[in-house]
Image: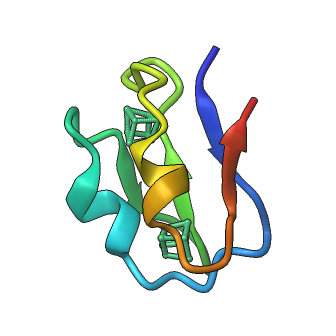
Amino acid sequence: MAYVISDDCIACGACADGCPVSAISEGDGKYVIDANTCVDCGACAGTCPVGAPHEG
Ligand code: SF4
Ligand code: SF4
Protein backbone atom coordinates (compact mmCIF):
# COMPACT_ATOMS: atom_id res chain seq x y z
CA MET A 1 0.00 0.00 0.00
CA ALA A 2 1.00 3.60 -0.49
CA TYR A 3 -0.21 6.88 0.90
CA VAL A 4 -2.43 9.01 -1.30
CA ILE A 5 -3.11 12.76 -1.18
CA SER A 6 -6.74 13.86 -1.17
CA ASP A 7 -8.26 16.88 -2.91
CA ASP A 8 -7.93 18.76 0.39
CA CYS A 9 -4.30 19.43 -0.59
CA ILE A 10 -3.48 23.15 -0.82
CA ALA A 11 -0.22 22.50 -2.68
CA CYS A 12 2.03 23.96 0.03
CA GLY A 13 4.83 21.51 -0.74
CA ALA A 14 5.74 20.72 2.87
CA CYS A 15 5.23 16.98 2.48
CA ALA A 16 7.49 16.73 -0.56
CA ASP A 17 10.40 18.19 1.39
CA GLY A 18 9.91 15.65 4.18
CA CYS A 19 9.49 12.47 2.16
CA PRO A 20 12.56 10.24 2.71
CA VAL A 21 12.29 8.65 -0.72
CA SER A 22 11.19 11.72 -2.72
CA ALA A 23 7.94 10.06 -3.73
CA ILE A 24 5.93 13.30 -3.70
CA SER A 25 5.81 15.75 -6.58
CA GLU A 26 3.69 18.67 -7.67
CA GLY A 27 0.72 17.66 -9.77
CA ASP A 28 -2.18 19.48 -11.33
CA GLY A 29 -3.42 21.74 -8.52
CA LYS A 30 -2.23 19.44 -5.76
CA TYR A 31 0.69 17.23 -4.85
CA VAL A 32 0.74 13.56 -5.75
CA ILE A 33 2.48 10.46 -4.38
CA ASP A 34 4.19 7.91 -6.63
CA ALA A 35 2.72 4.68 -5.29
CA ASN A 36 5.65 2.66 -6.58
CA THR A 37 8.15 4.75 -4.61
CA CYS A 38 6.26 5.41 -1.36
CA VAL A 39 7.46 3.25 1.55
CA ASP A 40 4.40 3.94 3.70
CA CYS A 41 6.32 5.76 6.44
CA GLY A 42 3.52 8.22 7.21
CA ALA A 43 5.77 11.29 7.47
CA CYS A 44 3.70 13.23 4.95
CA ALA A 45 0.54 12.72 6.98
CA GLY A 46 2.28 14.14 10.04
CA THR A 47 3.62 17.14 8.14
CA CYS A 48 0.54 18.21 6.19
CA PRO A 49 -1.34 21.21 7.64
CA VAL A 50 -4.68 20.05 6.24
CA GLY A 51 -4.46 16.27 6.71
CA ALA A 52 -4.56 15.49 3.02
CA PRO A 53 -2.24 12.45 2.89
CA HIS A 54 -3.84 9.24 4.06
CA GLU A 55 -3.28 5.52 3.76
CA GLY A 56 -4.56 4.27 0.43
FE1 SF4 B 1 6.88 9.67 1.34
FE2 SF4 B 1 6.41 8.38 3.61
FE3 SF4 B 1 4.51 9.92 2.56
FE4 SF4 B 1 5.15 7.64 1.36
S1 SF4 B 1 4.20 7.86 3.42
S2 SF4 B 1 4.87 9.60 0.35
S3 SF4 B 1 7.36 7.50 1.79
S4 SF4 B 1 6.51 10.62 3.36
FE1 SF4 C 1 -0.65 19.17 -0.04
FE2 SF4 C 1 -0.46 18.65 2.55
FE3 SF4 C 1 1.56 18.09 0.92
FE4 SF4 C 1 0.99 20.61 1.52
S1 SF4 C 1 1.74 19.05 2.96
S2 SF4 C 1 1.46 19.79 -0.55
S3 SF4 C 1 -1.28 20.54 1.66
S4 SF4 C 1 -0.49 17.14 0.90
Which residue is at 22% across, 63% downward? Answer: 17
Q: Position of residue 40 (x, y in %)?
A: 48, 23
Q: Is residue 10 left or right of residue 42?
A: right
Which residue is at 25% across, 55% downward? Answer: 18
Q: Classify the position of the N terminus by image quarter.
A: top right
Q: Is residue 46 above or below residue 3?
A: below
Q: Is residue 52 left or right of residue 2?
A: right
Q: Position of residue 13 (x, y in %)?
A: 37, 76
Q: Position of residue 20 (x, y in %)?
A: 20, 37
Which residue is at 68% across, 66% downward? Answer: 51
Q: Position of residue 41 (x, y in %)?
A: 41, 28
Q: Is residue 32 above or below residue 26?
A: above
The front one of 47 and 25 is: 47
The colour scheme used here is rainbow
Q: Examine the image and state in which quarter residue 54 appears.
A: top right
- Looking at the rendered structure, the number of numbered marks drawn on it comes to 0
Q: Classify the position of the C terminus by image quarter.
A: top right
Q: Examine the image and state in which quarter residue 30 appears.
A: bottom right
Q: Is residue 21 above or below residue 24?
A: above
Q: Is residue 14 left or right of residue 47?
A: left
Which residue is at 77% across, 75% downward? Answer: 8
The front one of 53 and 11 is: 53
Q: Is residue 26 above or below residue 35?
A: below
The front one of 19 and 33 is: 19
